[in-house]
Image (spheres, rainbow, N blue to C red):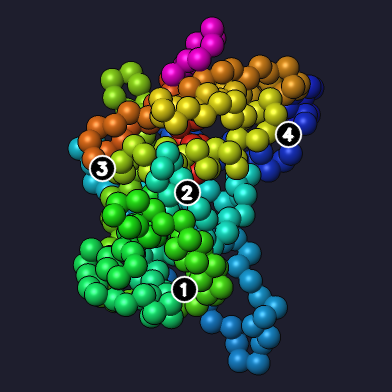
């Protein structure tokens, strides 16, 4: 039996896309919520290559991203943790990076606090700083010259390292720390302290619905949240007519962006002309809810109104930069 003519929009879809679309729904017409599948999942032992095989020739063909958080049982039932995005246009990062907001400055290290703590101790010893007190529970090393500290960063697996004197950051000390950590990035993953495991925070940011508005709850103060968000937006929101950072306002804790909403992208796709879709101007606004609680929301910055689905999709993208 021969089918009818294919529409111009659909003929450009690869066969895999039709298979994927056809597999979304069950036979009874309802979409299957796969969240509960995670609860029944069991971990299987890894595959073992036969003896004599060259292990260097084999790699993961389909790597599975790490989950950004643990399983949560909320008021509305089980919710599977969101995985880290693979690719998604994210720029390769350095092992140690500088952050600053106002007069404050610190380092972000791409390793968990229990791995960073031995490096921080090694730095204090190698520089002969004269350690006067060391509190691993708080992640603090007091020396005659400055106060060194490490704590959980905003992103999963990150740490924040500071070098302060009388409450103010010491620039020369941060420069030396940055150089020290960069030279030892390869050993950070293997040299972890069991006693420092308590420094890692379990609570992660969450995308939640408040009334008719979607927001992101960040378990961090507003200054540190803004600094990390500003850094990530400057690296990721660089695609013209898709996602662009237009203005950063550290005093108002906001960013003005130009973004192509998902509804416009879908419309352009089905019309066969993605370039016909128009980006809109929006504001990403941070609101402090306490010393360790910040809210991220989307506000209209132009005349065009953006719907709830578009706001949620934008917040999901931004949240993936902070996980």
What crowding class fits label 1: few (fewer than 14 Cα within 10 Å), some (14-19), or many (20 or more)?
A: many
Of circles 3 and 2, the one toward us is 2
Left or right side of 269 for 177 = left
- Residue behind mark 1: 188
Give whichever of discs 3 and 2 has the lower sequence position. 2
In the rendered structure, find residue 292 and report the number of the disc placed on it.
3
Labelled pair 2, 1 in contact (Cβ < 8 Å): no
Taking the spot 62% from the left edge, 54% from the top edge, the residue there is 92
Taking the spot 68% from the left edge, 25% from the top edge, the residue there is 241
- Residue 266 at least partly seen: no
Give whichever of discs 4 and 3 has the lower sequence position. 4
Q: Which residues are magenta?
A: 299-307
What crowding class fits label 3: few (fewer than 14 Cα within 10 Å), some (14-19), or many (20 or more)?
A: few
Image location of residue 166, percent across then percent down: 29, 54
Give whichever of discs 1 and 4 has the lower sequence position. 4
Q: Quadrant where the N terminus lies?
A: top right
Residue 14 versus residue 248: which sits nearer the camera?
248
- Residue 138 at least partly seen: yes
* Residues at marks 4 and 2, CA–CA distance in whole angstroms: 43 Å
* Residues at marks 4 and 3, CA–CA distance in whole angstroms: 47 Å
Give the secondary structure at mark 2.
strand
- Residue behind mark 4: 13
Left or right side of 204 for 5 = right
Choose top left, top right, bottom left or bottom right for residue 125.
Answer: bottom left
Labelled pair 3, 1 in contact (Cβ < 8 Å): no
Taking the spot 22% from the left edge, 70% from the top edge, the residue there is 135
* Residues at marks 3 and 2, CA–CA distance in whole angstroms: 18 Å
């Amino acid at each position: 039996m021969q089918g009818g003519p294919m529409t111009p929009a659909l003929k450009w879809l690869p066969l895999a896309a039709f298979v994927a679309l056809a597999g979304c729904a069950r036979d009874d017409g309802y979409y299957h919520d796969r969240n509960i599948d995670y609860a029944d999942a069991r971990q299987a032992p890894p595959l073992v290559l036969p003896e004599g095989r060259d292990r260097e020739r084999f790699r993961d063909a389909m790597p599975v991203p790490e989950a950004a958080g643990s399983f949560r049982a909320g008021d509305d039932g089980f919710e599977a943790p969101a995985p880290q995005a693979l690719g998604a246009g994210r720029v390769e990062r350095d092992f140690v990076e500088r952050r600053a907001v106002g007069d404050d400055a610190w380092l972000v290290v791409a390793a968990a606090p229990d791995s960073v703590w031995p490096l921080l101790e090694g730095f204090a010893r190698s520089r002969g700083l004269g350690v006067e007190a060391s509190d691993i529970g708080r992640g603090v090393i007091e020396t005659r010259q400055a106060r060194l500290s490490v704590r959980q960063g905003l992103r999963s697996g990150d740490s924040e390292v500071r070098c302060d004197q009388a409450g103010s950051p010491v620039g020369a000390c941060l420069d030396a720390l940055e150089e020290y950590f960069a030279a030892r990035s390869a050993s950070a993953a293997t040299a972890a302290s069991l006693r420092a495991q308590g420094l890692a925070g379990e609570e992660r940011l969450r995308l939640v619905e408040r009334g008719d508005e979607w927001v992101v709850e960040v378990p961090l103060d507003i200054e540190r949240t803004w600094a990390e968000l500003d850094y990530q937006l400057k690296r990721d929101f660089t695609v013209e007519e898709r996602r662009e950072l237009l203005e950063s306002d550290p005093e108002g804790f906001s960013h003005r962006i130009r973004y192509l909403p998902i509804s416009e992208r879908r419309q352009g796709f089905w019309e066969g002309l993605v370039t016909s879709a128009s980006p809109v101007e929006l504001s990403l606004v941070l609101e402090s809810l306490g010393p360790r609680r910040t809210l991220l929301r989307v506000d209209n910055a132009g005349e065009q109104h953006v719907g709830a689905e578009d706001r949620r999709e934008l917040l999901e993208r931004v949240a993936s930069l902070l996980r």
